Image (tube, rainbow, N blue to C red):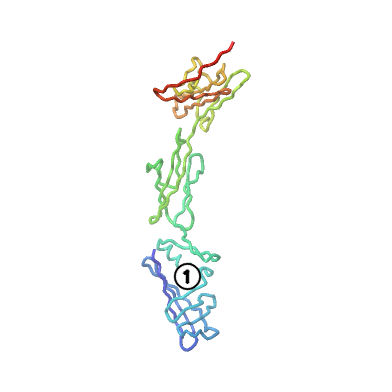
Amino acid sequence: MQTCYEAYYQGNDAGSGLTLSSYYTGYSANGTAFTSTYTNGTTPPAAPPTNPNYRRASGTNGDMRNFQGMNKGSYTTDMNSVASTSMLSIFNNTATTKNYIAWDYDSTTQEFSLIERLTATLDEIDDYEYQVQIGDNYINTYSYEWYVDGDPDTSVIGDIYQTTAPYGQNKELSVVVGDGTYYTVAKGTITALYIDISFNINTSTHTVTASLGGTAISHIDINDYTFQWYIENISGLGDEAIEGEDSLTLTGLINGNRYKLVATNNEIPEFSAEGSFLYGTRTVIYVSYAANATYQYPARKQCK
């Protein structure tokens, strides 16, 4: 954005002093111009410096401090203390009207920063109901375009989106918010419901009892499940099903074995789950070898 500032003065520049009766400032942004007129100004209390092109004046409200010559430009220390007449306020009022981006001024650091045109967040206001929250830097009418996992959902056009709980995999929800000129995107993740398995192991009786849990526990019926226990094969050649063990409880655990339970939901497959555990301790020895290699081992000495 190109922004220009101009200043014009009216007064008596004769001799060694200046009497300022009025001046006005003109601003333009992207070709749109607007002005403001000031009438503050007095004759400086002392003669100006040697340079004849340099003049000094003091405004009664501190609007103007220094200027050089006639119609040459101005410096002001009053950025925003007078809300209705300050340079920043005048610029921002017109910028907002013309759909330009306004500025903020920090009087402590004397730094300018852009005021974001649109700021939006996506907040969950109820279970699986989400609403766009827009910053109030600007007042406008907004449009909303909703997307689920990157796909548009044209069934919703307002600022509230209501959905159902996803099974097994999270949903990525996003909305494009626009005011006709500027746009921003708010995003959120809808966490999927899931089922997991926990184990209660009794080493005295060598028994384990499994239980189902997770965020979907209130959405399931235990009668929809079938169960199967396995002994995991450490070599990775496949797990061995334990025949007849198809409940949540398994007895006769053997030290060093790793057991796995598969819980299959026959109504909602996304709520199927599996879990495993190692019973006791296990020592594993791995031996690496190469094909066609010859290995020699020392003879074992036996004594009688």
The image quadrant where one finds the C terminus is top right
Image location of residue 206, percent across then percent down: 59, 18
Q: Residue at x 51, y 41 (%)?
A: 126
* Residue bearing the label numbered 1: 87
- Relative to 137, residue 73 above or below: below
Instruction: State the residue at coordinates (44%, 80%).
Output: 9
Q: Nearer the viewer, residue 284 or 175?
A: 284
Q: Residue 31: name its quadrant.
A: bottom left
In the image, residue 91 lies at what x, y percent?
45, 67
Tell whether 74 sits left or right of 46. Answer: left
161 horizontally vs 200: left or right: left
- Compared across the picture, whether 123 is left or right of 34 comes to right
Quarter of the view holding residue 291: top left
Q: Which residue is at the far left? A: 31
Residue 234 or residue 127, whichever sits in front? 234
Residue count near mark 1 (Cα–Cα under 10 Å), binned few <14, some 14–19, many ≥20? many
